Amino acid sequence: MEGLVASDPDHLQDFCVADKTSRINGNGYPCKNAVNVTEVDFFFGGLANSAVINNLVGSVITTANVEKIPGLNTLGVSLARIDYQPDGLNPPHTHPRASKIIFVLDGELDVGFITTANKLISKSIKKKATFLSSVIAGFNSQFPGTQSIATTLFTSTALVPDHVLTKGLHIGTKGVEKMRNKLAPKKT
C-alpha cells in the first residue's frame, strides 16, 4: 500500500530578518546580514494598548506583521489587534494569503464566515461584559493582506464597470455612484 506524505519544508536557518532596504522583490524580503540583527528586529509593543477609534465603522486594526517585526520574515505568522467601539464592526473582508483565528481579550463579538456553498457560519463570542471589545487575530502568513469587499468593488483602479456592479449586486447606477462617493479616499 502506497501512502502520500506532505509537509512544510524545515527552516534552513535560525532566522531570516527582513532587509526592508533591499531593492529585491520576491515572496517576502531578502535576509538582513546576521551581524546586523538585533533584538529590535524581533520586538513590537504596538498590540499592548487599545487604539483610539475615530472612524465611521467603529474599529481600528493594529497589525504585527513582517512590516513591523522584521524577524517574522519567512516564518509564516503574524498577529493583529482589533479594537471596537460599541456597535463597531470590521467590514466584510477576506485575507487572500492567510487563514485567521480570533481570541477575544475583552467584550463580545459576533464573528462568522460564509462558505462556498453560501452558508453563514457564525457565533457570538465573549470574554466578559465591557464597554469596548478587543480581539487578537492570528494568521498563518507573515503578511496576510486584507481585502475589504466593498472598497475593492467600488474603488478599484481601474473601476469595475457600472454594468457589472448593477447586474452582479442588483443595484441601480445611482447606488453604484453613491457607494463610490462614500468609499472614495478623502481628499486632503
Image: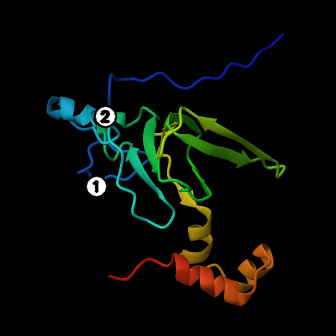
Density class for disc 1 (Cα within 10 Å; few <14, some 14-19, many ≥20) is few
Depth check: give the residue in front, 134 or 171.
134
Residue 152, labelled with which disc? none
Query: What's the amino acid at mark 1?
Result: Arg
Say what secondary structure mark 1 lies in: loop
The location of residue 120, given as percent across then percent down, is 78, 48
Identity of the residue drawn at 79% across and 49% down = 116
Quadrant (top left/top right/bottom left/bottom right) for the C terminus? bottom left
Depth check: give the residue in front, 113 or 140.
113
Task: From this view, report whether residue 167 is shown above or below residue 37.
Answer: below
Task: Check the image and name the residue furthest to the top.
Answer: 1
- Marked residue nearer the N-terminal end (2 or 1): 1
Of the two numbered discs 2 and 1 in the rendering, the one whose residue sits closer to the viewer: 2
Numbered label tally: 2
Task: Check the image and name the residue furthest to the left.
Answer: 35
The location of residue 178, given as percent across then percent down, is 61, 84
Locate residue 142 relative to residue 148 in the image: left or right: left
Task: From this view, report whether residue 55 is shown above or below residue 9.
Answer: below
The residue where tag 1 is placed is 23
Between the residue at mark 2 and the residue at mark 1, the CA separation in whole angstroms equals 18 Å
Locate residue 27 relative to residue 163 in the image: left or right: left
Query: Could you tell me if residue 3 is visible in this image?
Result: yes
Density class for disc 2 (Cα within 10 Å; few <14, some 14-19, many ≥20) is many
Query: What's the amino acid at mark 2?
Result: Gly
The location of residue 72, given as percent across then percent down, is 36, 35
Circles 2, 1 touching at the beta carbon (< 8 Å): no
Quadrant (top left/top right/bottom left/bottom right) for the N terminus? top right
The residue where tag 2 is placed is 71
Identity of the residue drawn at 66% across and 40% down = 124
